[in-house]
Amino acid sequence: MVAEIAVSPSTRGHLRRLDMRRDLARVADLVELCFYDTLDPEGRQYLNEMRRAAQAASFIGIASNLISDTSMPPSGYVWEEDERLVGNLSLIPIVVQHKRAYMIANVATHPDYRGRGIATQLTLAALKHAQINGAPTVWLQVRDDNASAIHIYLTNGFMERLRRTSWYNGPSFPQLPNPSGLDINNRQAQHWASQRQWLRQLYPKELDWNLPFDWNLFRPDIWGKLYRAFNLDFLKHWSVERHGELKGVLSWKHARSFADSLWLAIPELFEEDAILALLLGARSEIRPEQPLSLNLPANLAVETLRKAGFYPHQTLIWMEYPISRNK
């Protein structure tokens, strides 16, 4: 761990805190320029929200005086050079394991200004901010194919914690008969114990700050039913059994965003044909044009998901910077 964080001066540019009243639209433009090829519909929606917030300049002026850190509009740091905003880093407050922390996001440098250490200076400023404000840790996510960014973060003390891949459904999927002995049905109450155990393994508590998991939506008992009825939020569950033995459970929730969410609960040593049948059986009951998303540990069930008509959108490395309290 790095005990002391120092931001090195630069004579070629200027680093400063984000000014929400005049920077948001330019930040949105910069992020779109840098990540245009990798933005999904939800990412584009986020940029549109930033631009709408930028138009409400009077509101932002009041809010920025009352709130020091917020996720929308974001706080953070920008880099100006040649009278242009050419670098950005968003700093979002999060809660990890019941402790206040920060997440670094939207780290972007204009293509014409890369290789000058701008991203490094922005990152160091964010770490200094977290240290001054007493946060014990800082998190970020970086695409596994972004070698230059990974190098920056590892060099400055971040440690890889895990890798997750997000999947989307393709427009078509095969129609295959179920292998002998397999049955696809609605989940039964007695399946919940195994489903919960498998979900805890695939979606551990350490991910709650980024992949919130509402267990009450999954519970089959009366309290779960009352909770769902009160919140008008419902899930559909399918289970796959081989000769009466549970092999996996898939849950589907309609979302208000671009894609509906799927949660796959499978044991560590899963049976590929059973899980493929489960995925195909569920897809046959969902409108084929409905976008579906699934987030899993990287390299898990890759071939099975591909056979079921899913494709990987991106794999993100989750990295943590633990801030030392020793001077």
Image (cartoon, grey):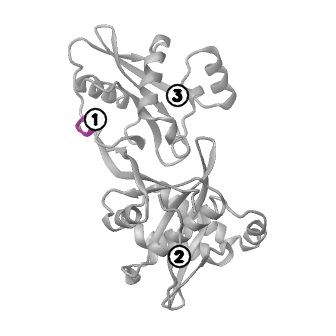
Give the mark, 3 or 1, whose residue is nearer the N terminus: 3
The residues bearing labels 3 and 1 have C-alpha atoms spaced at a distance of 23 Å
Q: How many marks?
A: 3
Q: Is residue 317 visible?
A: yes
Q: Which is the main secondary structure of the residues drawn in magenta?
A: helix
Q: Nearer the viewer, residue 318 or 99?
A: 99
The earlier-in-sequence mark between 3 and 2 is 2
Q: What kind of element bears circle 1?
A: loop
- Asked if residue 187 shows in the view, the reply is no
Left or right of 63, for residue 31 = left
What kind of residue is marked 1? Ala
* Residue occupied by mark 3: 235
Residue numbers of the magenta segment: 301-306
Q: Nearer the viewer, mark 3 or mark 1?
A: 1
The residue that disc 1 covers is 301
Q: Earlier in the sequence, mark 1 or mark 2?
A: 2
The x, y position of residue 72, in whole percent, is 63, 60
The answer to whether 94 appears left or right of 150 in the picture is right
The residue carrying pointer 3 sits among few (fewer than 14), some (14 to 19) or many (20 or more) residues within 10 Å by Cα, namely few
Looking at the image, which residue is at 48% across and 26% down?
Answer: 236
Residue 191 versus residue 59 in the image, above or below: above
Q: Secondary structure at mark 2?
A: loop
Gap in angstroms between the C-alphas marked 1 and 2: 43 Å
Question: 139 or 86, which is in the foreground?
Answer: 139
Q: Which mark is residue 183?
A: none
